[in-house]
Every structure is written in C-alpha cells, then in structure tokens.
Image (cartoon, helix red, strand yellow):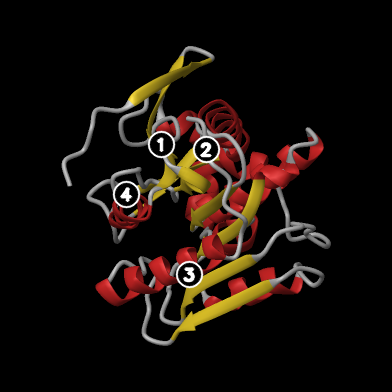
Amino acid sequence: MTQTPPEFLELKGINIALRKRAGANPGIVWLGGYCSDMLGSKANFLDEWATEHGRAFLRHDYSGHGESGGEFRDGTISLWLEQSLAVFRQFSSGPQIVVGSSMGGWIALRLLAELQRLGEGGRIAGLVLIAPAPDFTSELVEPKLTNDQRRQIADRGYMEEPSDYSDQPYIYTRALLEDGKDNQVLKGVIQTDCPVHILQGMQDEDVPYSHAMKLVDHLPVDDVTITLVRDGDHRLSRPQDLELLGRTVSSMADNIKTIPSIQ
C-alpha cells in the first residue's frame, strides 16, 4: 500500500508526524514501541485492516522517532505520553480501540489514566496490548544494568546497548529511567473500565511473558484475555501473528457498538 505523506502537529516546538484514516467507530489508534515508528509491519497491517473494514485509524511517531522531529535522547515516557494524548484528543473522535506494542502498551495504560483524569475515559473502548512493557525501565532495564553501564549513566547521562532490530544501538538516558518511576502502573489495581486483550510471545527475549502475566495480576476486575503464542518472539510480526492481531481487533470492534465517525 502506498503511504500518504504524514500530517504534523506542532507541540512545544516539535513537529509530531501522524497519519489518520477516516472511517467508522470504534476506530483504531496505534501506539508503537521504543525506537519503532508508525510504518512498521504491524501498524501498516492495521492500516490495511482499517481500510478493508471501513474503520477510522490513527497513528503517530513519538518525538525522536520516525518522521517526527526532536531528539531521541530527549524523550521520556511523560513527553511521549503528552504527545500521544494531544494526537488522540485532536485527531480522533468517539470510542477508540487503542493498540499498543511493547512500550506502546505502557503508553496506552497511561493514556487511559490521563483520559480518565480528564473525564474522557470512555473514549477508550478497548485495549489490545502486544508484548506490553509497562514500567520496563524499572522492571526490565535497570535490574540488568552492569556496573559499567551504571557508571556511563552516572558520568554522561546515558548508556548504549546493541539492538537486535536496528543498526543503531538502544540508548537509555538517566532522564528516561528517572521519569519512568513517575509513570509506573504496576503498583496497584489498574482500572480500565474496558476490555483488554494481551498478545504475548512465549519466546520473547525482550519482554518475557512473565511480565505480561504480572500485568494481568494488576487487572483483576476487568474483562481481560491473554493469548500466549508458544513460538512467538517480541515482534509478533509473522503472517500468522498479524492474522491473530486482525482477528483480535475485529472481535473487539464487533462487540462494541458502532457509532458513525465524523473525522
């Protein structure tokens, strides 16, 4: 599918790139992962799915990612959440199913909490979380830091490690790690007031499936489903994985009352 040029929303001097597709509600909102962008295979698959099913679809790149401006090293969960909230409120209307991948799962949970705080929690009609990584800075990154990496963060404010998904290394800054503590969600009951479906690969070496199970423990009062893919990795981007994603989103959308969207 040929990609249309992105639109841009300027926030605090940073141009946030986004793409939106008009259609029926509940629409789909995509939140990508750390160091990923809105032109990845899962996001493009959902764009095609939305076209086929006549659903609205919205996606964007966080600052320092993809086609957005800003420096990656300046990014924090709070900053990327602020950008996601602004894009969601300005470029979608009515109920939406938010699909969050990896870090995007964390952003999705924080987005819902912020919308609830604003009295708009009903805007999120469902959550589909793919290999969700809530609190990954404190739960998954910091416990594995070597003494040398801790010295790097203390001395220069960041550390690097090789990435399996890019030629560029992952960069973790002191600001990201400290800000992550202010955005923790795995510290009590997470009240979503909407269905949640988690898709998790059991061969995921980046976000182990035990982390997804821990998240489920914090969602005890909600309609929560978890699908474990025995041979699935962190990407969950194989044809069969994308088919599973499509079935999951379709099922959730079909069980939510469709309201015509004006976008």
- For residue 234, side relative to residue 258 (left or right): left
What kind of element bears circle 1?
Answer: loop
Q: Which amino acid is tagged 1?
A: Ala
**What residue would you read off at disc 2?**
261
Residue 138 screen position, x and y as percent: 64, 56
Of tags 4 and 2, the one toward the viewer is 2
Q: Which badge, 3 or 4, comes first in the chain's sequence?
A: 4
**What residue would you read off at disc 3?**
248
**What residue would you read off at disc 1?**
22
Q: Eyeballing the image, is 210 above or below 197?
A: below
Q: Which amino acid is tagged 4?
A: Thr
Residue 36 screen position, x and y as percent: 36, 47
The residue sitting at 60% across, 58% down in the picture is 127
Judging depth in this view, the residue of 209 and 138 nearest the camera is: 209
What kind of element bears circle 3?
Answer: helix
Q: Which amino acid is tagged 3?
A: Thr
Q: Eyeballing the image, is 220 above or below 121?
A: below
The disc at residue 51 is 4
- Asked if the residues shown at circle 1 and circle 2 are in contact, with their CB atoms under 8 angstroms apart, the answer is yes
Q: Which badge, 4 or 2, comes first in the chain's sequence?
A: 4
Mark 4–mark 2 Cα distance, whole angstroms, equals: 14 Å
Residue 64 screen position, x and y as percent: 39, 31
Q: Which amino acid is tagged 2?
A: Ser
What kind of element bears circle 2?
Answer: loop
Of tags 1 and 3, the one toward the viewer is 1
